[in-house]
Amino acid sequence: MIEYISATDFTDCQRLFHGRGHAYPNLSHVNVDWFSPVILITLYQEVEQDWLLLQAQALFDLVPSCTSVQVQYRCRKLAPTAVVVGKDIDTTIVTEMGLRYHITFGRAQNVGLFLDMKNGREWVLKHADDKSVLNLFAYTCPFSLAAIAGGAKQSVNIDISKSSLTKGRENHRLNNHPMDKVKFEGVDIFKSNSRIKKYGLYDVIISDPPTLQFGSVNIERDYAKIIKKIPQWLKPEGKVMLCLNAPELSEDFLFEMIKLHCPDCIFEERISPPAVFKEVQGKGLKVLVFTYKP
């Protein structure tokens, strides 16, 4: 696996190896991420421990600033994390494009930042100046950080998880952002239209929903509900970024939802993940940007 890792700059957090894209034979069950000073190996099926230790040691030697190699077993119940080589580190602060993020290992399935969305955050950073931004399914608020760093006059974060929004607030404070420009609403997006509308109309909407969240989200069923609300939330000529993580759904699903439920949204551009996220089956992240022209 190590031969496929070509990164030379380890300043920013990044994916080092993307096996889940099926671009590398016999390694579709392995991802490797860099969250300084930790390398995180994610496994989607069991492997031989000798193989894992060999890879972990090679990765440890590859990156001089690495002090811990950990493995997360997504193939096991509750996705436990264990240290393979080096120190036991459960929290760190990483950087990406000049912004800093709190990262946590071993407490949840996700560490606090989705690396495949880097180019989406860069788009927000470049398009947020003097804009009012609505960040749906905000999680720990990475898009909001990009918006405020890009000069947004307001960023409104909506997520059903109040604990995630608390981490988002901590991320903003970590970057010394003016907190009067940032709003946090721990509500169900599908049941709280009035709470969303009260800060609008918006210049930019970001929708990055989970594919499936038991009890709250089934994106194949629910994305239409979001798209139908665009005319209530977005200013004319405003931008909407629609993200889709479901591997079984192509970007045609998003185009069809727009055609059916908000045809005044005109397609503008496609945002691809960083090059390391090689996909041979088209099942990776899909991100489309539309302009609302009623």
Image: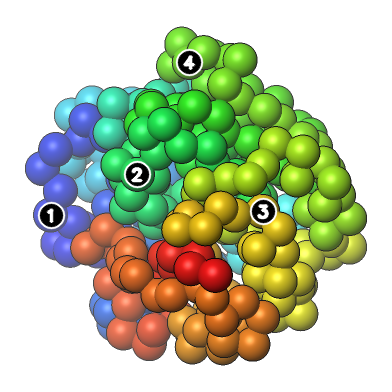
Does the rendering let one see residue 29? no
Which quadrant of the view contains residue 167?
Answer: top right
C-alpha gap between disc 1 and disc 3: 43 Å
Residue at mark 3:
233
Specify whether 154 is left or right of 192. left
Query: Disc 4 residue type?
Result: His
Circles 4 and 3: CB distance less than 8 Å? no
Single out the mark in the foreground, 1 or 4: 4
Residue 106 picture location, percent across and down:
62, 38
Q: Which mark is residue 177?
A: 4
Single out the mark in the foreground, 1 or 3: 3
- Element at label 1: loop
Residue at mark 1:
6
Q: Nearer the viewer, residue 50 or 71?
A: 71
Look at 85% across and 46% down and name the residue there: 194
Query: Disc 2 residue type?
Result: His
Which quadrant of the view contains residue 267?
Answer: bottom left
Mark 4 or 3 closer to N-term? Answer: 4
Query: Disc 3 residue type?
Result: Trp
Look at 53% across and 37% down and name the residue there: 132
Q: Nearer the viewer, residue 24 or 254?
A: 254
The colour scheme used to paint the residues is rainbow
Q: Which mark is residue 127?
A: 2
Specify whether 227 is left or right of 84. right
Query: Disc 1 residue type?
Result: Ser
Circles 1 and 3: CB distance less than 8 Å? no
Circles 1 and 4: CB distance less than 8 Å? no
Residue 65 picture location, percent across and down:
23, 26
Single out the mark in the foreground, 1 or 2: 2
C-alpha gap between disc 4 and disc 3: 25 Å
Circles 2 and 3: CB distance less than 8 Å? no
- Element at label 4: loop
